[in-house]
């Protein structure tokens, strides 16, 4: 993975994304998606833990008490690219995390599909989240990706996104969603707060409204982008 000059700052949030080299498909089937999600979960943690091959074989092995180098806030995997909203916990954590995730998944994918070489297009892209409001909007942008690109009309049923977890349809142990959902708890009126409190009751219905209410606009923007970039 190419060297990144700009360092990441601990306790800050970043929107990370990348796509397949030459826009190629990087997730071909259910197993590919699940493998990438396993790497996202596993490489968040430092300290002693089973080898990755052992973790994927025996899911009951628990190392969730290990210190984290990053926290994944939300994510969405698309057939040829991914989006991750992440917080750096330890110095150098994002760079270490992404290097291990990309290397591990590329090795798996190349072995499985009998190919060699880079799978992703250069180094991953990273956009710092500079305001509290931006944090909420980035999470919405990430979760709307499958709908905006017309991959699905059923955003709640899309299985390779943390959105179902955010609206309480399923539990996803990968994500630290409280930092977002606290802003949507009952009576909060979308208040801007970055202090997650597990004791609070979060309002998934308010977050669902926040995302779904922007769906048609996001799809129109996506269509316009394609028209501008690929005119007849």
Image (tube, grey):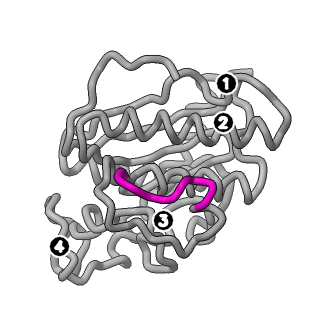
Q: Where is residue 54 in the image (x, y as percent from the top left)?
A: 61, 60
Q: Which label's residue is closer to the chain start, 2 or 1?
A: 2
| Residue hosting label 4 | 197
Q: Does the magenta stretch include residue 14?
A: no
Mark 1, mark 4: which one is toward the viewer?
A: 1
Instruction: Kindly indicate whether the residue at mark 1 contacts the one at mark 2 (C-beta within 8 angstroms).
Output: yes
Is the stretch drawn in magenta largely helix, strand or loop? loop
| Residue hosting label 1 | 118
Find residue 200 and name its label: none
Label 2: how many residues lie within 10 Å, few (<14), some (14-19) or many (20+)? many
Instruction: Kindly indicate whether the residue at mark 1 contacts the one at mark 3 (C-beta within 8 angstroms).
Output: no
Q: Where is residue 42 in the image (x, y as percent from the top left)?
A: 48, 55
Q: Where is residue 156 in the image (x, y as percent from the top left)?
A: 56, 71
Mark 2 lies on a secondary structure that is helix
| Residue hosting label 2 | 106
**Mark pair 3, 1: CA separation:** 29 Å
Instruction: Kindly indicate whether the residue at mark 3 contacts the one at mark 2 (C-beta within 8 angstroms).
Output: no
């Amino acid at each position: 993975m190419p060297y990144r000059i700009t360092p990441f700052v601990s306790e800050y949030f970043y929107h990370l994304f990348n796509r397949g080299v030459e826009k190629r498909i990087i997730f071909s089937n259910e197993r590919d998606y699940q493998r990438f999600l396993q790497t996202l979960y596993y490489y968040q943690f430092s300290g002693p833990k089973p080898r990755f091959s052992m973790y994927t074989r025996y899911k009951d092995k628990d190392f969730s008490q290990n210190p984290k180098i990053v926290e994944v806030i939300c994510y969405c995997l698309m057939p040829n690219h991914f989006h991750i909203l992440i917080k750096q916990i330890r110095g150098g954590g994002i760079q270490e995390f992404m290097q291990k995730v990309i290397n591990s998944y590329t090795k798996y994918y190349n072995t499985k599909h009998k190919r060699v070489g880079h799978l992703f297009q250069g180094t991953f892209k990273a956009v710092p989240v500079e305001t509290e409001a931006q944090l909420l909007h980035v999470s919405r942008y990430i979760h709307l990706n499958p709908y905006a690109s017309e991959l699905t009309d059923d955003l709640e049923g899309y299985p390779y996104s943390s959105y179902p977890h955010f609206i309480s349809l399923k539990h996803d142990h990968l994500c630290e969603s409280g930092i977002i959902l606290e802003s949507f708890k009952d009576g909060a009126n979308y208040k801007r707060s970055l202090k997650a409190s597990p004791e609070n009751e979060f309002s998934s219905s308010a977050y669902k409204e926040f995302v779904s209410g922007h769906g048609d606009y996001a799809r129109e923007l996506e269509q316009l982008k394609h028209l501008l970039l690929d005119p007849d």
